């Protein structure tokens, strides 16, 4: 079933919920600020309107009163032009007042009334000025006829101004409303702050409650897995935490299986496996250790590794352990172990030191049988050297004397038998020499006489030595070189060429060609002389490209001639020159090649 509320969804909710609260708070705050701004604009407009109304009222009353009393008997005649000029001057702020009043909400009717009252007031003034212009006698009639009208018009005008001012004054109570707005904003901010704290606290507690138990459960399972203990039951959470716990259980099961396989492998292996402390004391051993040494496990754990090593090899083992601890590298060496029954076993050690654990881990392979085989091989080679080659040389010399007629003229039948015997002795001598060369090269005891030699002379020597066998099959050996000299052991390089060219002749069809090319190549490691020997044979299968250079290896179907050491000897000789050898399997025929440095790079000795 698909999860509706996984950790991602919960995380989005945890983020969006506080964010939504903040948006709501910001919206309320913006709405309140907008209302506050509108109210402040209205209050400002109201103050301006009151100020303008008050100014107009004072100016109008001042000038009309002055005009009225200046026109009374006993006073100077009224300067009507000046009064009219003042009235015109007052008309502009009055019109502004009317426009402001009319644009103010709820004051349009008052504005019309004020304008009507003002027109009526001005009409009465005009009538009074008209009568005044007829003389003082007529002016007295003004007081009798217009006092009441004047008073009523003035009171009406003032009353209209008063209505406007009272209406705006009532709006001035909005200042208290503004203060309430400010308090509301403070309350909103405080409420939002407290709400944010509350929501954050609730979410934090919820997250803590939700995650605490699964995370502690997972942490405990991880700890138990590291200690290889039984895990707690898997979580039933249908989310990523539940999946993580399931993965831990799966990983723990896999680790246990791997441990079981490794333990089985350690217990079933024929090699000794030991874990030792930094001072060489044995801490853990596998069953093969007890089987090989004859000591029981509890007896071994009471000893140090130096108690098991043969006394003559203790210094070597101690030196190798010290080197492994100091360098941290793998140390491989051979020492003899003393068994419980007193026998000595030849062993090969591979040790790695762990600085973190302060322990040495060692895999010990019993090479007693291998050493015995090597001694038998060495005895066999020594026997060949002393007991076979010398008699063969003597026999070869005697038969040569017979074939040359030193002991008298031989019949054709006897001469043919002597010639066959000489060929057999030469073949045996070649086999012995191959075995001895291989043994010396493998032991690193073959002396290399290095020098700068002519490449053409080396190749021609090899061709000349093999000319007779090539002519017997109608093989034409050709040669092309772009190199003058090479730094090498001349005799050993001729031996390599002889082996490779003789193989090419042997595996080529009759009446075909074998071609030798020599050239220089440049690589990152230096400049090399590369030699290719190409023939028209069936070539080498790719899966045998490396195997044929091993000792005693032959191609499938090859006749059992020689020792099977030729290519192995070639590989060792080329390797002694710090070069390499191989075969190109992509060629249509056989294409063997080898390369050696053009100039000396390192000292090559015995």
Image: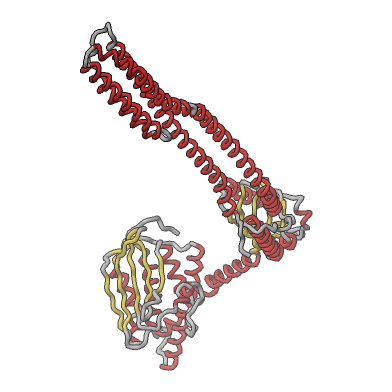
User: Taking 491 as reference, is 217 left or right?
Assistant: right
Outermost residue on the top side: it is: 74
Q: Quadrant of residue 417?
A: bottom left
187 w.r.t. 566: above or below: above
Q: Nearer the viewer, residue 189 or 602?
A: 189
Name which residue lies at 33% across and 68% down. 530
Q: Quadrant of residue 404?
A: bottom left
- Numbered label tally: 0
452 w.r.t. 219: above or below: below
Residue 572 seen in the current view = yes
Name which residue lies at 39% across and 21% down. 155
Which quadrant: the C terminus? bottom left
Colour scheme: secondary structure
560 w.r.t. 228: above or below: below
Which quadrant: the N terminus? bottom right
Q: Position of residue 394 (x, y in %)?
A: 48, 76
Name which residue lies at 65% across and 64% down. 368
Q: Nearer the viewer, residue 46 or 215?
A: 46
Q: Position of residue 64 (x, y in %)?
A: 31, 17
252 w.r.t. 480: above or below: above
Q: Position of residue 558 (x, y in %)?
A: 47, 84
Q: Position of residue 173 (x, y in %)?
A: 49, 27
Q: Nearer the viewer, residue 104 or 245?
A: 104
């Amino acid at each position: 079933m698909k999860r509706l509320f996984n950790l991602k969804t919960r995380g989005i909710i945890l983020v969006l919920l506080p964010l939504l609260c903040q948006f709501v708070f910001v919206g309320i705050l913006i709405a309140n600020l907008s209302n506050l701004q509108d109210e402040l604009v209205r209050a400002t407009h109201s103050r301006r309107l009151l100020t303008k109304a008050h100014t107009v009222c004072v100016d109008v009353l001042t000038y009309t009163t002055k005009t009225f009393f200046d026109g009374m008997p006993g006073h100077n005649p009224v300067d009507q032009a000046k009064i009219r000029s003042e009235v015109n001057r007052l008309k502009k702020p009055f019109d502004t007042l009317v426009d402001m009043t009319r644009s103010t909400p709820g004051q349009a009717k008052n504005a019309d009334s004020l304008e009507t009252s003002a027109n009526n007031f001005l009409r009465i003034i005009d009538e009074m000025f008209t009568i005044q212009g007829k003389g003082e006698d007529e002016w007295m009639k003004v007081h009798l006829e217009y006092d009441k009208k004047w008073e009523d018009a003035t009171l009406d005008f003032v009353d209209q101004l008063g209505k406007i001012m009272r209406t705006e004054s009532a709006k001035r109570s909005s200042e208290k409303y503004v203060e309430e707005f400010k308090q509301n904003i403070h309350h909103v901010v405080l409420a939002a702050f407290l709400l944010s704290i509350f929501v954050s606290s609730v979410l934090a507690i919820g997250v803590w409650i939700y995650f605490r138990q699964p995370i502690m459960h997972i942490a405990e399972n991880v700890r138990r897995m590291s200690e290889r203990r039984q895990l707690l039951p898997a979580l039933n959470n249908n989310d990523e935490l539940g999946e993580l716990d399931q993965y831990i259980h799966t990983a723990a099961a896999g680790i246990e299986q791997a441990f079981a396989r490794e333990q089985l492998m350690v217990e079933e292996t024929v090699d000794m496996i030991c874990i030792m402390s930094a001072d060489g004391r044995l801490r853990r051993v596998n069953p093969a250790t007890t089987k090989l040494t004859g000591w029981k496990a509890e007896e071994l754990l009471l000893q140090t590794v130096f108690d098991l090593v043969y006394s003559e090899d203790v210094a070597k083992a101690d030196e190798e352990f010290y080197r492994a601890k100091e360098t941290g590298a793998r140390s491989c060496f051979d020492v003899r172990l003393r068994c419980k029954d007193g026998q000595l076993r030849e062993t090969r050690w591979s040790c790695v030191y762990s600085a973190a654990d302060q322990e040495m881990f060692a895999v010990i392979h019993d090479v007693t049988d291998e050493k015995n085989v090597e001694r038998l091989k060495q005895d066999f080679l020594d026997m060949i050297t002393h007991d076979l080659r010398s008699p063969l040389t003597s026999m070869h010399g005697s038969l040569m004397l017979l074939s040359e007629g030193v002991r008298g003229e031989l019949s054709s039948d006897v001469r043919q038998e002597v010639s066959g015997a000489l060929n057999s002795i030469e073949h045996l001598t070649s086999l012995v020499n191959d075995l001895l060369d291989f043994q010396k090269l493998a032991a690193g005891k073959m002396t290399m006489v290095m020098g700068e030699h002519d490449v053409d002379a080396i190749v021609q020597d090899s061709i000349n030595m093999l000319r007779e066998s090539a002519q017997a099959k109608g093989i034409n050996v050709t040669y092309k070189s772009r190199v003058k000299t090479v730094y090498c052991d001349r005799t050993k390089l001729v031996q390599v060429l002889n082996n490779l060219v003789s193989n090419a002749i042997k595996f080529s069809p009759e009446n075909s060609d074998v071609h030798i090319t020599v050239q220089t190549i440049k690589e990152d490691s230096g400049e090399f002389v590369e030699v290719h020997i190409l023939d028209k044979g069936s070539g080498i299968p790719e899966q045998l490209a490396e195997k044929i250079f091993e000792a005693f290896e032959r191609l499938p179907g090859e006749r059992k001639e020689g020792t099977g050491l030729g290519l192995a000897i070639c590989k060792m000789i080329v390797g002694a020159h710090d070069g390499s050898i191989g075969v190109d399997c992509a060629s249509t025929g056989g294409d063997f090649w080898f390369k050696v440095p053009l100039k000396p790079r390192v000292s090559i000795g015995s």
